[in-house]
Every structure is written in C-alpha cells, then in structure tokens.
C-alpha cells in the first residue's frame, strides 16, 4: 500500500511521514545544522553542561539554563559548532577521557550509565558533551590561555572599585606628581603649554620621575614627584577627585589644583589598609578577572571565525 508523505521544505529529513516527529532546521554553520530538537536537548542537559563545559559554566546563559530563549540557545550552539569544527575530537579520544573519569572516580561504566539515568540524562548526551568540552579545552590551550593575564595591579584596581567601597575598608594611594606654577611663567598660557609638553614627554615614554625632576616645581621633584602613600583624607580635594578616577599606572591629563598650580598625576600603587579583608578577597578577585578575560578572548576568537564561516539562521517565528 502506498503511503503519501508530506514534508515541508523547512523540515529536516525528506521521507518522514505525517504523524512522525518533524524537526526544523534552526541554523546552519558551514556543513553542520542546528535543529529544533537541539534546542530542546540543550534545555534538558543544561545542568549537565554546567558541570562539563569549561566555556559555559559561570556565563549569563548558564544562569538562565533551561529558561534561556531559543534565540540565545541557537546563538550559543552556532558558536559551539564553530569551535567543534575547528577542534575535532574523535570517538576514541572521548572514550579515553570517559575511561579516565571512571578511573578517577573509581566507578564502572555501568555505574556511570546508572548515575546519568537517575539524573535524567542519556549516556549519548554525556558522550557528546564530553566531546564538545574536550574541543573547547583544546581551544583554550591553543589560542586563549596564553592571552589571559591578570597582574597584581589589576587585582588592586578591581578590589578598590568593587570591594573596598562596599566593605567600608580604607585605601591608601601612592601618587607621583608634576606641578607647574603660574608664577614661574610670563603668562598662564605659557604655564599651560609647559605642563602639556611635560605630559607629552611622559606619554612618549620618558619616565614620569625624570620629567618630574626636570620640570616640576613641587618639593617632591627631587624624589621624582613621589608623595608616598596617602589616604583619601590626606589628599587635596582636586587630587582626590582625580585619583579616584584612575587605574594603577595611569597618568592623568593636566588639571588645576591647589594654589593655582597645574598638576599631572600618576597613580603608582594602591594599598588596602584592611589587609585582612584584601587578602581574603584577592583570590576571588583574581579568578573573577581571569574568567572575564577568558570570555573576552573567546569572544574575539569567535568574532574572527564568524567572519570566515558560512552561517545561516532561520527566521524567528512570529
């Protein structure tokens, strides 16, 4: 008996008959496709993915999990296809990794199957997530890790801007200054030009301390403009206002300060006066900054790859 099958052009596989589950292509990346069922599978396995995927855990999408929109999930899966096409992982490599996981946890394959089933996951889903996670780790090792660096100044800057203000702990600033007094020049314009020239010398690479010794008329000039560590309360209002905008190592523009003088300021260092609180938080800060930089470098890598990939997304349903 002849059975007629009607399949819409946008559906996945010719030959699926009426009444069977029809799948829709949501996107394509080069030769790979992303299906409507892939979106549902993502939702069902989001919690497992959070445990396995090094580039998913801790992201805004992982926080949404199954509640993420279809468009957000498709965008994520498009990027994932780009990665897995570039970093192919064979079945045997996946098997090796699973065997290592079993060995580390002292469990059998049967126990692994049983544990996954109890949590509502299939072994096939687990196998493919291990493959995907391995591809992403390969990307991290080859193209991302070497570009991620968080130094002590980054940690101090972030701590000052995000933790010390909330905790109420005080901060000391080590500042270097160059001052130009109006009285040392014939006109105010000449003093301004001298200050701007000094700033350009610093920006061109001359050591701030050397420029301070050469042109500053502050008492600190002989020590390269170094004021040492000072709390906010010890700083003149104009200096405090400027320094609180700055990052360690940053040099300010020329600005007017006390006594009608023109100032150039360099923030050389920051110290938390509550060292116990800083020491408690610094590892958390460093890890947070590293995670953010990993995501930034991943975004740059993906942006480059998207430029050379053939990507098509299905129109969103109205």
Image (cartoon, helix red, strand yellow):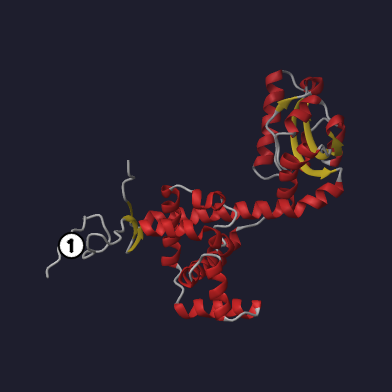
Closer-to-camera residue (87/90): 90
The percent coordinates of residue 272 (x first, y second) are 83, 44
Where, quadrant-wise, is the N terminus in this rendering? bottom left
Report x, y in % for residue 205. Answer: 67, 45
The part of the image, by quadrant, that contains residue 254 is top right
In the image, taking residue 198 as reference, residue 237 lies left or right, namely: right
**Picture mark count:** 1
Q: Secondary structure at mark 1?
A: loop
**Whether residue 211 is visible:** no
Residue 252 location in percent, x, y? 70, 34
Work out which residue is located at the far left of the displayed protein and give it: 1
Q: Residue at x 82, y 26 (%)?
A: 236
For residue 148, what is the image quadrant?
bottom right
The C terminus lies in quadrant: top left
Work out whether residue 5 or residue 268 is closer to the camera in this orientation and state it: 5
Q: Quadrant of residue 199?
A: top right
Q: Is residue 34 visible?
A: yes
**Residue 45, image x and y in percent?**
50, 61
Q: Is residue 144 above or below residue 209?
A: below
Which residue is farthest top? 187
Q: Please rate how many residues cluster around mark 1, counting C-alpha atoms within 10 Å: few if below 14, some from 14 to 19, many from 20.
A: few
Residue visible at 79% across and 43% down in the picture = 270
- In the depicted structure, whether residue 217 falls above or below residue 142: above
Q: Which residue is mark 1?
A: 5
């Amino acid at each position: 008996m002849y059975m007629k099958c009607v399949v819409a052009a946008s559906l996945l596989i010719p030959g699926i008959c009426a009444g069977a589950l029809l799948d829709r292509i949501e996107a394509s990346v080069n030769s790979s496709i992303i299906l409507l069922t892939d979106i549902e599978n993502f939702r069902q396995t989001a919690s497992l993915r959070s445990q396995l995927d090094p580039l998913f855990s801790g992201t805004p999408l992982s926080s949404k999990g199954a509640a993420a929109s279809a468009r957000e999930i498709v965008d994520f899966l498009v990027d994932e296809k780009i990665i897995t096409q570039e970093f192919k992982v064979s079945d045997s490599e996946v098997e090796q990794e699973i065997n290592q996981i079993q060995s580390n946890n002292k469990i059998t394959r049967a126990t692994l199957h049983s544990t996954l089933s109890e949590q509502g996951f299939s072994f096939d889903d687990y196998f493919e997530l291990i493959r995907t996670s391995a591809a992403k780790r390969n990307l991290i090792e080859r193209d991302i890790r070497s570009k991620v660096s968080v130094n002590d100044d980054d940690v101090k800057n972030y701590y000052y801007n995000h933790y010390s203000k909330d905790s109420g702990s005080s901060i000391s600033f080590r500042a270097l200054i160059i001052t130009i007094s109006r009285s040392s020049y014939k006109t105010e314009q000449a003093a301004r030009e001298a200050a701007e020239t000094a700033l350009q010398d610093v920006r061109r690479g001359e050591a701030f301390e050397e420029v301070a010794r050469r042109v500053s008329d502050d008492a600190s000039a002989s020590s390269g403009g170094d004021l040492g560590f000072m709390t906010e309360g010890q700083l003149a209002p104009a200096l405090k206002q400027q320094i609180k905008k700055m990052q360690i190592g940053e040099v300010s523009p020329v600005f007017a300060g006390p006594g009608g003088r023109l100032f150039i300021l360099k923030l050389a260092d920051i110290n938390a006066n509550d060292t116990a609180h800083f020491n408690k938080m610094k590892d958390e800060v460093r890890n947070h900054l590293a995670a953010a930089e990993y995501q930034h470098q991943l975004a740059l890598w993906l942006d480059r790859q998207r430029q050379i990939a053939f990507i098509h997304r299905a129109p969103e349903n109205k």
